[in-house]
Image (cartoon, rainbow, N blue to C red):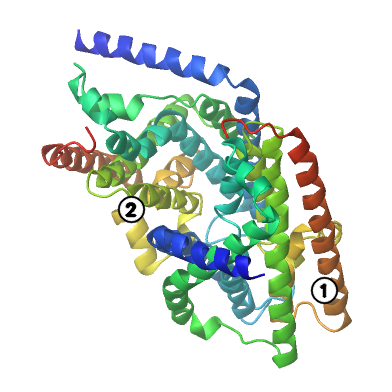
């Protein structure tokens, strides 16, 4: 029952977003072009590096291409569902719109997190998948049904990690208006998630595996498809980390709510 | 001239508001940079000791990225283009048409003020980072080269500013310029040498790139410092760089004068 109600609400939010996007059609298409350009840029970086070496750690060229495709897919789907919403929380607080949302008979976190959908993200996500498919062909890998399902589930876990951490950071805006800078700073870290994990070691690797799991998010799903997983525990680690991150963000959110005393109204 | 000193002065005071943002930006910017450096270290580890990539030793490669960070802090445009576009969209430039102030010069002063504050703030995180990698940081080839490097950096700053200024003026014609700004940024990012030194590209590609203004927006001064460009090539490069600055100065002036004719002061 509850689920049905929420899916109706979410359907309405989707319709809103579609209408909004279609109001600026040329802009919508241009943005897709910009994202494609950046994606091509990352691929060319790898292309150039592999002109001068044939492996980074134990990663070959097409394996890294696959990683970049996976990372792009995850980032774009994250962007489609959550990015705008997370960055806008501080605006909602500053302008007092949050008060209005708190009065609505729905879960406030649900509403804040999923208010807008960025449709371009889905289009760009497919370009990531297309590149992965091409890389798989180059590697002579034919992933079976199970590993494809596993891949999407791991991607979902990765997206959940990104969402939880970014949401947690954006709740800082309950205390300071500067939070937006921190949220965009986190977005910068996405750059790390498309790097092959074995390029790193020591503190850096530990930090970005366990504290901020950037080196798990895209690496684990890509390794599953590229048959590079050293042990199934890597997958367990990713899913468990996602659970921990989500729990932390819920605790942070509740704590922030408890201390919220409206801004401008 | 004195009125523009005023602009710089108030610009600096205004920019102080952004200091914490600047600090975040500089500090967070270091993390992906660190990742790139680790990546290169791993690549060099996979080779024989002392081998080089297109003339770059490991120290040279790491220094390249550090210098890119320094030159970028000194010369990059970050908020200016957005602000110019907003000024046009909201009709704020009307006041400049009435006052005896030249908008391009005014904007340039604000750009200089912004860079001043940014460098002052970024000095802490970037300085610490360079100190951390000090064993890899190579010095300039010699003093005259270093002077030429500084000169080229100044030209880079002007070129960056003029190109962004021209791009932002598109706001006279289109409502949403952010996509165009991002496209230009993407081109600068790869063809300017942010991602990797341009001379590790296949020779044909880097030759073609040399016909565009992008390498002169970042790569050229860095290559002077590292000695990758030397002798008469430096002078030739400086002449081309000056040429681009002059071209973009006139383009900016031209686009501005056309834009003003189109301008209808929406909301102003």
**Label 1 to label 2: alpha-carbon separation:** 44 Å
Callouts 1 and 2 in the same chain: no
Chain of the residue displaying label 2: A
The answer to whether any part of residue B93 appears in the image is no
Position of residue B3 relative to residue A28, above or below, is below
Q: Residues within 10 Å of mark 2 (few under 14, many from 20)?
A: some
Q: Residue at x 79, y 58 (%)?
A: B249
Q: Residues within 10 Å of mark 1 (few under 14, many from 20)?
A: many
Chain of the residue displaying label 1: B
Where disc 1 sits, the SS reads helix
Where disc 2 sits, the SS reads loop
Residue placed under numbered mark 2 in the picture: A212
Residue B34 in picture, x, y percent from top left: 48, 66
Residue placed under numbered mark 1 in the picture: B238
- The label shown at residue A112 is none
Residue B237 in picture, x, y percent from top left: 84, 72
């Amino acid at each position: 029952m509850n689920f049905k109600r929420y899916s109706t609400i979410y359907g309405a939010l989707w319709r809103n977003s579609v209408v909004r996007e279609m109001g600026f059609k040329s802009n919508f298409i241009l943005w897709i072009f910009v994202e494609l350009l950046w994606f091509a840029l990352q691929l060319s970086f790898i292309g150039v590096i592999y002109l001068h070496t044939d492996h980074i750690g134990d990663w070959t060229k097409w394996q890294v291409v696959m990683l970049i495709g996976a990372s792009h897919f995850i980032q774009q789907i994250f962007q489609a569902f959550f990015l705008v919403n997370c960055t806008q929380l501080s605006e909602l607080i500053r302008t007092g719109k949050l008060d209005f949302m708190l009065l609505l008979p729905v879960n406030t976190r649900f509403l804040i997190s999923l208010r807008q959908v960025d449709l371009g993200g889905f289009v760009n996500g497919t370009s990531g998948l297309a590149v992965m498919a091409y890389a798989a062909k180059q590697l002579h890998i034919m992933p079976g049904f199970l590993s494809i399902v596993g891949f999407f589930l791991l991607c979902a876990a990765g997206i959940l990690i990104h969402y939880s951490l970014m949401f947690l950071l954006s709740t800082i805006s309950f205390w300071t208006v500067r939070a937006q800078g921190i949220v965009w700073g986190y977005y910068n870290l996405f750059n790390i998630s498309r790097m092959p994990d074995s390029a790193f070691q020591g503190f850096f690797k530990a930090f970005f595996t366990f504290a901020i799991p950037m080196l798990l998010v895209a690496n684990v799903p890509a390794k599953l498809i590229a048959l590079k997983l050293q042990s199934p525990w890597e997958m367990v680690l990713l899913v468990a980390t996602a659970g921990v991150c989500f729990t932390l963000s819920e605790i942070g959110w509740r704590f922030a709510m408890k201390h919220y005393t409206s801004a401008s109204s | 001239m004195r009125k523009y000193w005023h602009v710089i002065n108030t610009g600096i005071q205004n920019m102080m508001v952004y200091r914490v943002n600047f600090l975040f930006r500089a500090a967070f910017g270091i993390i992906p940079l660190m990742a790139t450096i680790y990546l290169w270290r791993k690549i060099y580890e996979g080779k024989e000791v002392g081998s080089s990539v297109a003339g770059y030793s490991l120290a040279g490669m790491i220094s390249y990225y550090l210098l890119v960070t320094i030159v970028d802090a000194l010369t990059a445009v970050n908020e200016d283009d957005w602000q110019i576009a907003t000024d046009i969209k909201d009709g704020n430039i009307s006041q400049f048409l009435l006052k005896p102030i030249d908008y391009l010069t005014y904007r340039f002063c604000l750009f200089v003020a912004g860079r001043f504050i940014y460098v002052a703030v970024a000095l802490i995180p970037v300085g610490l980072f360079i100190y951390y990698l000090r064993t890899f940081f190579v010095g300039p080839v010699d003093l005259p080269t270093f002077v030429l490097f500084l000169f080229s950096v100044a030209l880079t700053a002007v070129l960056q500013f003029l190109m962004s200024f021209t791009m932002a003026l598109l706001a006279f014609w289109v409502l949403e310029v952010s996509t165009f700004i991002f496209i230009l940024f993407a081109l600068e990012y790869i063809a300017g040498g942010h991602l990797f030194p341009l001379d590790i590209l296949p020779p044909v590609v880097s030759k073609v790139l040399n016909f565009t203004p992008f390498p002169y927006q970042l790569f050229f001064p860095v290559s002077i410092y590292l000695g990758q460009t030397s002798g008469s090539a430096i002078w030739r490069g400086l002449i081309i760089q000056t040429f681009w600055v002059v071209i973009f100065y006139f383009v900016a002036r031209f686009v501005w004068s056309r834009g003003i004719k189109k301008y209808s002061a929406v909301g102003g």
